[in-house]
Image: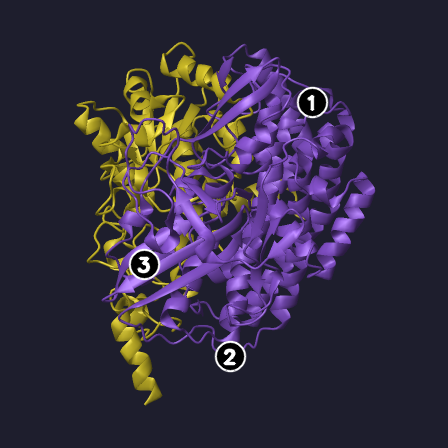
Chain colours: A purple, B yellow
Amino acid sequence: MKVDIGPVTRLEGHLSIHTTVENNIITEAKSVGEMFRGFEVILRGRDPLDAQQITQRICGVCPYAHAIASSYAQENAYNLDVPPNGRILHNLIQGPNHLYDYLLHFYQLSALDFVDVTAILGYQGSDSDLTALRDWVKVEVASKSPFPAAPFLPRLSGKYLSDSEVNIGALKHYIESLEIQKKANKASAIFGGRFPHATAIFPGGCTQEPTIDHIASYRSLILEVKDFIHQKYIPDILAVAAEFPEYWNIGQSKGGFMSFGLMPFGPQLDSKRLFAPGVLFGDKISPVDFDAIKEDVKYSKYSSPSGLKIKEGELTPSPHKSEAYSWVKAPRYQGKMLEVGPAARVMVDYLQNHNPKIKQLVDKFAGIADIGVGNLNSVLGRHLCRAISAVVIADFLLEETERIDINGPHMAQYDLPKSGVGFGVTEASRGALLHYVNIENYKIKKYECVVPTTWNCSPKDDNDQPGALESALVGTKVENPEEQIESNRIVHSFDPCLACAVH
Amino acid sequence: MINRREFLKLAACLSASFGLSNFPTIVNAALKKIDPKTIPRLIYLQGQSCTGCSISLLQAESPNAVSMITQYSKLSFHADLSATSGKQALNLIEEYISGRAGEYFLAVEGAIPWGMPEACVIGNKPFGDYLTAAARTMSGAIAIGTCASHGGIPAAEGNLTDAVSLKEFYKRKKIDPLLIDIPGCPVHPDWVWKTIIHLVQVGLPELTNGQPKSFFNRKVHELCPRYHDFQQEIFAEKLGDKGCLFKLGCLGPDTYADCPTRWWNGGQTWCIGANAPCIGCASPQFAAKKIFPFYRAFEQAASGSSEENK
């Protein structure tokens, strides 16, 4: 039977999944991106310095990652000499965006796949948040109004956590996390100017000065977020894992993995990074080669040629193209499919023995959950790798504040060239993000973005190889083929962002 | 310790000295007590959007987002927060839009691809079809953010989908619903949530150019704490400098919004406070034309810095 499970909610944007289910097993899955704007065309002919502003509007969930990738690409194109503070401030702006995003993803976007909201009705304690929530749900349900207790109900049928204490704890943290994510965003906004859509980020630094006033507030906010990560976020993931251990083996993508590496230690873009870059196929890791990336469009709604390299990218929409089922393109590396995101980021670093803290955390949690590194490629693995990333990033941000020279410059001096080309790559919270800019006569001639969810939610490529999410869904057993809570859990584990994917 | 009698006397003096003696009566007349049965249900739909406005709404401080969606409104559907999904979600939306589930306000984030309806689809149906159907049943609509209010970046010069704002969409459909525009890229959470509180407790707020007057009545430049620098001709010459940012291309003089007095992220920061020129994100012209870059005087900035080096 054919079942469309879209619109899939609790993710960014417009995603449907067209599934074929036989005997309760998914035999085919098509990932369908349903919204298109055409940023790469809108950018043509504009001033290059507009790009780190315009590209933030690709995605309001991870705008800072786009601002950073665009700034890197422009630094590369301008041959900018970036002061050490400039790079540190970029990191201080980008890092908390990961922290907020991981918390938002686990609590607001994913938790309701596992946590039983109705457990709140049995709450006997005196916590004011929880009694207020309980009384609100009671009034809602008694009111006989249509769809009571929305947006928390209705929900899909399936098994939810059975331990009422775990459920109620997670609901409390759902509410608390909404306060904590604001603190992470306040921290990055100190230097970014505001969140979302920072105005103070530029190639070569940030316009806000790093004063003691700012740094002290920043550190205090990050410490609060760090505390929540350790005290609440990680225990909640482990509690979900304890009752749903099968999800260490469900939702495995069937290709390679790639990370562009996150947060350089020095002003140069090729400085060693906190998370190492690399491409992983099987157990072999190689350096990233941007030239090995091509974007196929056989099943994407574009009439522009298929299989173009980044520098040659084109975009001609063709909404009625036969066979095409998605607005997302299908990027491939050496013709092969791969997954990007937290699991890729952590595995690529771990297998290179690069960051000792990552190795220690992976080994610790693998021991607790009794899993191998290979199980990071799974629903629970992706959740765990976000938490590992959160721990490593929070510590790094605190260290980074100590490296600021408060008397040093915080912005590069510009002497913008008439022409130039540049690549900028970083890790958005959702994975490997690439921007490419080609400047001619002081204007943008071509701008290309290859974005994490473009990889993860891609349709089939020219050789009919499925995308990462599609491959992770095939073979999944679903209790209720009409609703597929299992598929929703798999989709959510990738944290898709469709505004990013199509842009 | 002050006793009750002294307190009342003091309170009466204070009221008189502030000219507020009638304050409680006025408040009672104007502010309705919140009746949980009548708070508006919101059906929040996203078109050509980046979700930045939704994320901004979660940054609300007082009241916070949880209070807003439980005490002051009911968020009947939002794709980012709703537990429901798939057909169940489509059914919920359909029950409201058909009028069967009672009164509701429509909240729209994002532009509408007028020239290419396939460029935004929810459940195999073009986004615009939901808007047309909802116009017959909704109490009113709130355009959230610059894309929904003015078209924004999806509608910028050279776009391929002929993206339009909600107001333009309804105009072309010859529909004239009650519509409130709340621009900003992203929107400030207070602008939306406090408009909703106004709707709940007082009724429709006073509008100027279709936007709530209390937030969009003055230009950023008029309210700017660096207006003094402007008058004294203390200008930032290059990015990262303090002073008035006018020469770097600051669009505060062309943008109606109360950012200089409200600030962002819990009142802690804002663009100009971080030495970043206002890019006019709440303006109808935001990012509209290629010939008007955000930093239109950056060549001056570059020459300013080279002068310094001489």
Query: Closest to the observer: A90 or B70?
Result: A90
In the image, residue B223 sits, relative to residue A383, either above or below, namely: below
Determine which residue is flagged by label 1. Answer: A160
Q: Secondary structure at mark 1?
A: loop
Residue B232 in view = no
Tag 3–tag 1 contact (CB < 8 Å): no
Q: Is residue A70 left or right of residue A397?
A: left
Whichever of labels 1 and 2 marks the residue nearer the N terminus, that label is 1
Query: Closest to the observer: B282 or B131?
Result: B131
Q: Residues within 10 Å of mark 1 (few under 14, many from 20)?
A: some
Q: CA distance from mark 1 to mark 2?
A: 54 Å
In the image, residue A420 sits, relative to residue A280, either above or below, namely: below
Residue A291 in view = yes
Q: Chain of mark 3?
A: A
> What's the residue at 60%, 22% (across, down)?
A485
> What's the residue at 29%, 63% (across, down)?
A439
Q: Chain of mark 1?
A: A
Determine which residue is flagged by label 3. Answer: A50
Residue A480: x, y in percent? 61, 14
Query: Closest to the observer: B237 or A329?
Result: A329
User: What quarter of the picture does the C terminus of chain A occupy?
Assistant: top left
Of circles 1 and 2, the one toward us is 1
Residue type at mark 3?
Answer: Asp
Determine which residue is flagged by label 2. Answer: A408
Whichever of labels 3 and 1 marks the residue nearer the N terminus, that label is 3
